[in-house]
Image (cartoon, rainbow, N blue to C red):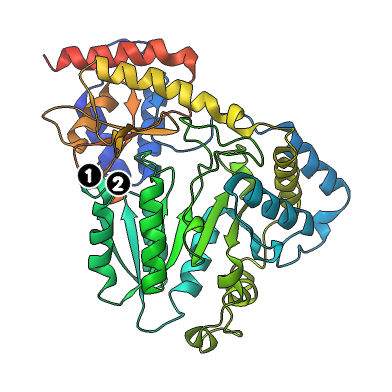
Amino acid sequence: MSKKNPFPINKEVILQLREEFGINSLAYCTIRQIVQLVNSLQEMFEVKFIRTEMGVPGLDAPDLGVNAEMDALKRGVSSVYPPIEGVKALKQELSRFAKLFLDINIDPAGCIPTVGSMQSSFITFMVANRRDPEKDTTLFIDPGFPVHKRQVVLQGMKYESFDIYNYRGEKLRDKLESYLKEGHISTFLYSNPNNPAWICFTDKELRIIGELANKYDVIVMEDLAYFGMDFRENYGVPGEPPYQPTVAKYTDNYVLLFSSSKIFSYAGQRIGSLLISDKLFSRPFDGLAKVFNSGRFGIAILQDALYSTTAGAPHSPQYGFAALLKAVNDGRFDFVSYVSEYGERAVIMKKLFVENGFKLVYEKDEERDVADGFYFTVCYPGMTGEELLSELIRYGISAITLDTTGSSRTEGLRICVSHTGKDRMNELEERLKLFARSRG
């Protein structure tokens, strides 16, 4: 077997590596374990895999942010603790961004820089799930990012979840209410656009979520990590419709989780933010007063949850993030055009998978086809997701199964487009054809 053309890779070689890395099941192993396995296979056979398992940026960070951060370092911010509430310039630009691209008003006080969107969710769980002793459970609208559930478990909290696949549109109302009427749900969490399915909630669905949040006093955690990346619409013109859809139009019980990682490829700096509604930020809760130094939601987030975890977000990345947001807010940088490359790759990759016998799993937002973007989901007739991934790895293609995301579609895989440039589409096509031929 030539090292330059090793496909299909011998199953025994892969099984031996899996045993070495403690991978008992490809369906439930971590993304990091897939990465370790594929890295070893690449080194062993001196070949580059088509890497679709990691949801990491595949574009260079804009110079605007990098230069602003370098300037801040030269000014000496590295020797000074950042203010716990965040750098003023960043808070102001986050507030402007909310108005210009979401068409909502959020005071800069409620725009709080965090160590990435992951910290945003962690500290929100910490506070929101302690505000009422009778409301102690998070409801995840799946599929979703598995680590969010780990955050809840690590804090000794409870969660429930369901796959939205069969509950789009008006069906969502009854499904949500079946949990809410029990009286124990404190928070909802979902991503929009969705990781891993790339579904996008319709305005009807967001209205339903908001109305039920009001009715049952639930805090909605809306993960906007892929802000504006539903390329069926252009959400990138400041102050002009259409605006990024959000539950914030229908309730004040919201916390938006916002990130610089994907829309600005600023992932390495671990800078994101919380955007908390003005009403919720100042709202007092008796349950919080028993745990935190303040019973007010926003103060508990800032002075207890954020302070006790990281004492604020890193100083210099806040200036880089602020510069990028200011350029976007001023209309000098079109972030949607910047990330539209992902949508263009998705169009090609979906076509190649479908032409070789694959089917899309999550393919509709009610009546509309799902957008082309950062992720999509595929299956192959007659195979489980674990079986499919086991075989695709033999042909130099990596992915993750949907099993770990809370999806009921155990036949599916998540495909991320970010690390497959257009220059590698021919390789992807060749490997998919090899796989398809092997299936007869």
Residue at x 40% of width, y 55% of height: 207
Q: Is residue 431 visible?
A: yes
Of residues 125 and 420, the one nearer the viewer is 125
Residue farthest along the right direction in this orientation: 75
How far, Cα to Cα, is label 2 from label 1?
Answer: 6 Å
Residue at point 58% right, 71% down? 279
Amino acid type of the residue tagged 2 in the rendering: Cys
Q: Secondary structure at mark 1?
A: loop
Position of residue 400 measured from the top left corner of the image (x, y, whole percent): 32, 38
Instruction: Residue 224 in the image: state x and y as whole percent.
Output: 50, 48
Residue at image point 29% right, 27% down: 393
Q: Which quadrant holds the N terminus?
A: top left
Type of amino acid under label 1:
Ser
Q: Quadrant of residue 38?
A: top left
For label 2, the SS is: loop
Residue 194 in which image quadrant: top left
Image marks 2 and 1: residues in contact by CB distance under 8 Å: yes
- Give 1 or 355, whichever is nearer the viewer: 355
Q: Residues within 10 Å of mark 1 (few under 14, many from 20)?
A: few
Give the vertical position of 47 relative to 160 (above or below): above
Q: Is residue 382 above or below residue 70?
A: above
Quadrant of the image for the C terminus?
Answer: top left
Residue 24 appears in view: no
Residue 391, image x and y in percent?
22, 26
Task: Judge whether 182 appears above or below 88 on screen.
Answer: below
The tag on residue 25 is 1
Q: Is residue 4 left or right of residue 113?
A: left
Near-viewer residue (430 or 207): 207
Image x and y of residue 101, in percent: 61, 44
- Tell me the residue that label 2 is attached to: 29
Whether residue 322 sits left or right of residue 279 in the image: it is right
